[in-house]
Image: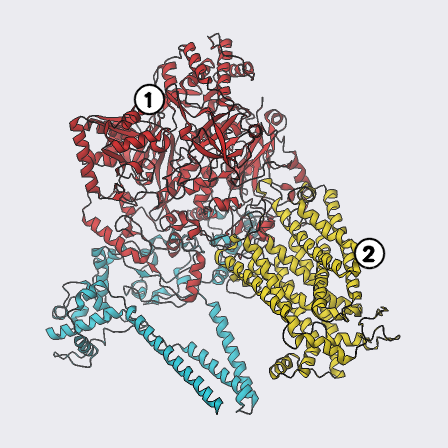
Chain colours: A cyan, B red, C yellow
Amino acid sequence: MKNTSASGKKRGHLYAFTAILSLCLIIALATLSSFSGAVDEHVAEKEESYSRDDLRRGQRLFKGLVAFESGIHDCSSCHYPSRTDTMNWNPSAHDLAMRWLQEDDYSIREKLAMPVGQRMITDHAGMSVTEREEHLIEAYLMEVARRGPGELRAIPVNAVIFWGLGILMALALVDLLITKKIRFKIFHVMILLVGLMVHMQYAVAESRNLGRTEGYAPDQPIKFSHQVHSGQHDIDCQYCHTISKFSPSAGIPSNNTCLNCHNVIREGSQSGRFEIDKMHRAEASGRPIEWIRIHKLPDHSVFSHAQHVGVGGIECQDCHGPVETMDILRQQEDLSMGWCLSCHRDSEVAFLDNPYYEPFERLHALIRAGELDAVTAAELGGEDCMSCHH
Amino acid sequence: MNKGNTRYWKSIGDLAETRELSISEDAGGEEQRSMMEILADEKNETASSRRDFLKWCGISFFSATVISACENPVKKAIPYLTQPEELTPGMATWYASTYQHGNEYCPVLIKTRDGRPIKIEGNPSSALTGGGSSARVQASVLSLYDDGARYHGPLKHAEAASWETIDREIIGQLRNAAARGEKMALVCPSLLSPSTMALIKAFREAFAGLEVITWDAVSYEAIRQAHKESFGLDLVPCYQFDQAELIVSFSADFLGTWVSPVSHAKQYASTRRISEDKPHMSRHIQFEGTLTLTGANADERVPVKPTQEIRILMALYDAMAEATGNIGLGAGAVDYDVQALAGEILDRKGKSIIVCGHNSKECQMLVNGINAMAGNYGRTLDNSAPLHIGRGDQKSFERFAGKLQRGEYSAVLFYNTNPVYHYHQPEMIREGLEKTALSVSFASTRDETASHCTYIVPDNHYLESWNDALFREGHYSLAQPAIHPLFKTRQFQDSLLRWMDREQDFHHFMKQYWQEQLFPKQDAYPDPASFWTHSLQAGVLDTGLATQAMPAYRSGSVREVAMALQQMLQGEAEMEFSAHPHLAMGDGTHANNPWLQEMPDPISSVTWDNYAALSPASARSLNLREGDIIRINGQGEWPVLVQPGQADGCLSLALGYGRTQAGKAGDGVGSNAFPLSRRMAGQRLLFGPVDSWEKVGDGHRFARTQTHFSMEGRAIVRESTLDKYRMDPSAGNELHAYHEKHALTLYPEDHFDGHHWALMIDLNACTGCSTCVIACQSENNVPVVGKDEVRRRRIMHWMRIDRYYNGEADKPGIVFQPVMCMHCDHAPCENVCPVAATMHSKEGLNQMAYNRCVGTKFCINNCPYKVRRFNWFEYARNEAFDYHMNSDLGRMVLNPDVTVRERGVVEKCSFCVQRIQAAKVTAKNERRRLKDGEVLPACVQSCPAEALVFGDLNDKSSRVAQLIKDPRNYHLLEELHTLPSVGYLTKIRNPE
Amino acid sequence: MISTNIDQTLVTGHKSYGQITGELLANTQGRPPLWWLVGVGLGGILLAIGGWSFYQTLSKGLGTWGLTNSVAWGWDIINFVWWIGIGHAGTAFTIFFLVFRQHWAGSINRSAEAMTVFAVMCAGLFPLIHMGRPWLAFFILPYPNTRLLWVNYNSPLFWDVLAISTYLIMSVTLWYLGMVPDLATIRDRTKNKIQRTIYGMFSLGWDGSLYTYNRYETLLKLLGGLAAPLVISVHTIVSLNLAVSVIPGWHATILPPYFFVGAIFSGFAMVLTLMILMTKAFSIKDYITEKHFDNIAHVLKYSSLLIGLAYATELFIAWYSGVEYEIYTFFRARASGSFSTAFWIMVIFNAIVPQVFWFKRARKSILSLFLVSIIINVGMWFERYVILVSSLAEDFLPSSWTGYQPTMVDIGIFVGTFGIFTLGMLFFVRFIPVIAINEVKPISRIGKEKTVKDSQDE
């Protein structure tokens, strides 16, 4: 009797504890989420004129739950309110919201009434909104701007498998030692063994990839497509990345490089004027464009484009992958030291052509004697630590 | 971040602010954007390479990897909006400029990376310094980023004020004073800049009643006065040590601090360099009380206290006069064979040079006399190309100080001068400033005088300024800004122009001056515009000299001189003090530079301190021990350092310490020796009797980098004499042949394809000046560790100057030996590293992979040369090491090509592998062989004496390949068969 | 096989097997005595000091130690070598006396082995924390990685890692397996359910049958055979860290045997210290008798002679080689220079003081035994100090000569290892019979019956 009441008491404590803990968690999460979207100062200025009701109705309009008076069904089928991992050429809802916020005389109604550019004219043909609807949409855009571009939510398949197996293993262990419901012990053993192997594999793979960003393809501030420029239009890489042959850095093109062409080409075939406008707006405002860096070497490694592109004559694609096919630029290789080294060990150097290599007399003699076909980078110091680390 | 006063950003988050600033400035209308301004326009600042960006944000690679291990941080890459044409991200841009401070002068090249200066090199086009530099020149780039000590904008009563207010108020007061006919004064040191002097002249005309007082803390006025007496010419002659076969110096530290050490070192080394083709060298005799760098290099060094030294000078004069039939002084006999010396001088007629470091007119007149009798004028001393230094006027400054104290001035302006620290009666200035209505200091960094001024109108750093210089007649050079002003400062000259109500800025003033005054003097460029552009590019301009007849020497009244000197000698005392500018600190202006503070004095190996140096015998007789603290003449307290080689009865003190308003690195380091100086016969003398001293403490611990001074009989520095060398070029180096012959190894011979890098050090040319040490520190991001850590023997310098004594303790021979990583072909460090973090490269370099190092320190132990350094702490971004690497601005000086090492890893000299790699890529890209001398490690490039030669041993025609075959060549500890890639050439002395 | 010829009683007092079991298990039962609690408290304090020092080291860097640019190994490696040396006795006892049939050692084996395990643990700490970046210590292990980097097989430090980890594994295995029968005894005698479960798990289902015993003996002998070379190799390799270098005073071929003898010497001295303390603490005088102490004293005396010989040889060779650096190191730096105090402490404590054991009275007196054993370990510490520091502080170029001063953190870490050792030993004596019951029982009859045949050895 005593025993049960004591344990009941204990259980009660446990429940209370769990409840308090979850409450704390919820509060913490709520507080955090309210801070997460950094409120732009512009937002704060314009915010007062919109009520919560406006926002709700605006959202319904934008997402097509309620039809516009003019019969437009929804904005969100082109202007996605959330992030996607595929190229969406149309400006996203967040893009629009930011544009609206930054430009003082930006009016949705006017934009629809007087579309600029061929793309916009075709896409928005016959569309119009009323003043009230504009107000509601603005209320929603305000919310979108406040929320930020949002995170891409991929399904964490690996995590599900990892934790699922973990739970299964725990159950197997409990059953094996304590509950003993299943008679065939081979069952437990199998689960434990397989689970352990999978977990080990994960651990190895994860620690291998620690700090690696293979496949990294973030959204860029401008929907610049290498596929369009370097693929479709066949522009040479070094046309824009001009310094890669003689500077350690490949050089992210400055805005004026872009404007060399885009002073004339004001409209893209897929994104219309919206993306190209960003460059002109940057030029006008004097704010450089903040690209997101994709290929990042650790801080202690030196990489010279001049050596590889200029001297070695290596194709850009050898390290950066088929850039000319990528709408969204993606990190193709893992950029690990092993990857660097294996290339240094395999790549042949244009040894006989460059007078620089004349002092390598022993190697020249070997080639003349026919004992050596070609010289690899590694044989010329491509494996030396201080070639890359100094 | 104070909005608008800095032109750099700390983090991406701060960028927005900076950006807005530049926009508003752009909108403010720019009449013309000079190249430099575009460069410095930080709205365009690139972060094109994340590596570079992180580098100067100073994030060590550890934090980068760990953070990226946790999550993938978004790194922004912000390209230029409009990329300036001159600038390539990731590559350095060079600008020619000029370093000048007092008598220090050096044409330089400034290396900028992504718009920020990171390294100073000597300008090889200069006929005077020829690519050499000094430690202070090398370190000057760091003071640009001295966040703590530099004024961030104009101040009034120590409160920030706007330029408009300051200008309005100062102009008003100056005009009122001028209108009322009140006295005003502008105090400045002797200036090298001809256009600034023209500007000051114009300024004086604009404000009637303004006196310009020129005053130097360390003065060469006496040389000027003596030449006026001897030749009727108010000048300092050009000293040409390269023409001299016999050099006699009385306390002139011409290789360290006297007149123009960089060019002297170059000239001196050219007479000391010796080879089988040229088996002769100069002979150098030094009389001095203090053991100076120059004295340490002398063939014959006579340690005598200052008064004794003057007696010898007088006796030498008499001996010379007797031998040449002139009137002597009638000085008494001295304990030195002056007859023999006079004979030696006369044997080499016109090929000797006699110099004296005392700022005494009479001494200098004797020196002039001796030089004239030896026929040196027109040969080793050039009056036709005088040096424009030492214009300071002690008497007028004293008058000024008196009047200032009495409150007779209504306005006083201080440019580049700090009398509250430098003058021996600072209270006169301090009291006077309180009585003066308008006191203005143009100091760019905090100083003692500025702290007593009402207005501080900060000058730019020289790397942010336009300027020019005329050091030697006919040898002009230019200074141009390499970065936009980091703070809201304004160039001194621009302030003057502004106050004179001129529209012009100094850049245009100077350009106009050059085109009007200097363009006609040359004929290389046809039009003024291209003349200006090319001069700016080259940095130096040699206009040549107008040929004119030089007046002959006249001895003047020998009796007067003798009487004046006798009066001076009455001050002879048992114990005399002698103060001298410190090799690193100079006159103390750069005391807040932690690189200079931590530069070991090559003589005493002391860092972060000054001291009273006493000879062992004197210390014994005074019953003092090293570390005892004494108070001298009631003026200051110095710890005693027992210094072999000091003259008995001479107590030496370094100037430049004891600053109280310099900044966190310089404040309270040592004591100020300037107040000890005394006035005698119109000049300030830096020596005098020790009237009183008392012991006030003991147990002071010096922060020394070397504590054992004997070579213990080991063949570390090998030396011989000229006679022996002539008979056998391998004299003194017999062991080398022995070890070469007895070298046995089980291993196959090493073979290097392509390059095999090597460094040769000529111990005969090396003066020990330590410029290379600071150059290396600057190039390789070597951290400053502070006094305590140096005491624990943990200095981080990658190269050091070892100094050994030989012979007796009171008259030791001194040798210097630069030691850095030897890059041994059989490196003992390499095979003991368990993780293979240090390996041999295919080019013979001993490589150190910092990111692989786990810090077992086995390599440090197994290095016989002890050149490896361990990062005992995190030196960057660590409150405990609050030097330049702890502030965002200070980290801007870091070289982006060199990793900032994390704590727990070993580092060492890499032969500046980043420079080797860069030169290789350039050569490969240009499809040509690498040229000899194309790769210059920082130490080699900075050396004023060209004592270091770097190159490729596989290139048989290279200079190193030639030198390594020299019979004088040996390797340090070659008996260990480590096969070093660094070779030394034996030191040869010329005792006879 | 060498037959035992010790004509003495190894276990005094006429005891039955049951009595032996009871007496030897006494320490694991009942309430812990006061001295034990005090000891644990003291050990805890020592450990806390060590923890603080450890924290300082990790959070600030190795700069908190007294090392300099020239002396890059100091107390860390001194203490490492010292502890490793102490860690020798346990395995040496078990192995060599097993092989040589020295049955008298049976009653000491267990504690000696425990001492080994804790000493090696203390020693192992130092190579880890003496690294600048201990979190990257795994770089030192050869494992396939994406950097395509391997360790440097030339480096003695890498050999050392392998040697020490192998040695630790082997000594733990030996110690543990040696305990199995005793653990089973406790399991069978205890009434506490939890204790029974835990001891039961660790006794691996021991049933005491002849069959089990047979297998057990075979296993121990096999393991002993395997471990014997390890005892030699581990300290040899530690010495190679120095011997493979170029530094004067380190670069010597005599170092491996010299270090090995030194290790045995200090290990036995430590065993002696601990045994004396244990006989004071527990009523085990009948098992660890004067005879044991006497034997250990003989061993110490002879190893001391060997050590003295090594010292003399080093000096002779330094002179004979004619190498000025070696001569300086041995005759100037060590014998007459900055390190002469430490050098003469080393010589007197290690080579001269133990010679008192030529006198029977010294061997009989517990006090003198205790004092000499402590002196030897102090002396051995100084030996490592002299070898390491004097060579580094004054090597080839006089310009880099420095002194060496340990800091509070250095001292604190050393103190902390005493904490680990003390606590380890205290918990050991509390939970495990300090004398191997199963080893004592077979030898308890030796010397009492006239005819003893080593039948079980065949």
The amino acid on which the numbered mark 1 sits, given as a three-letter code, is Lys
| Secondary structure found at label 1 | helix
Q: SS of the residue at dot 2? A: loop
Picture coordinates of residue B614, whole percent (x, y): 53, 30
Q: In this view, does A82 lie above or below A238?
A: below
Residue found at the far right of this picture: C450
Q: Nearer the viewer, residue A344 or B654?
A: B654
Reading the image, the residue beneath label 2 is: C359
In which chain is the residue bearing label 2?
A: C
Of residues B468 and B67, the one drawn nearer to the viewer in this rendering: B67
The residue that mark 1 highlights is B395
- The chain identifier of the residue carrying mark 1 reads B
Give the crowd class for mark 2: few <14, some 14-19, many >=20 residues within 10 Å: few
Q: Position of residue C429 (x, y in %)?
A: 66, 71
Q: Percent position (x, y) of residue B109?
A: 37, 39
Whether residue B857 is visible to the viewer of this picture, yes or no, is yes
Query: Residues at marks 1 and 2, common chain?
Result: no
Cα–Cα span, label 1 and label 2 = 90 Å
Vertical order, B896 against A262 (above or below) = above
Residue A374 is at least partly visible in this image: no
Residue drawn at the location 48% of the way across and 68% of the way down: A207
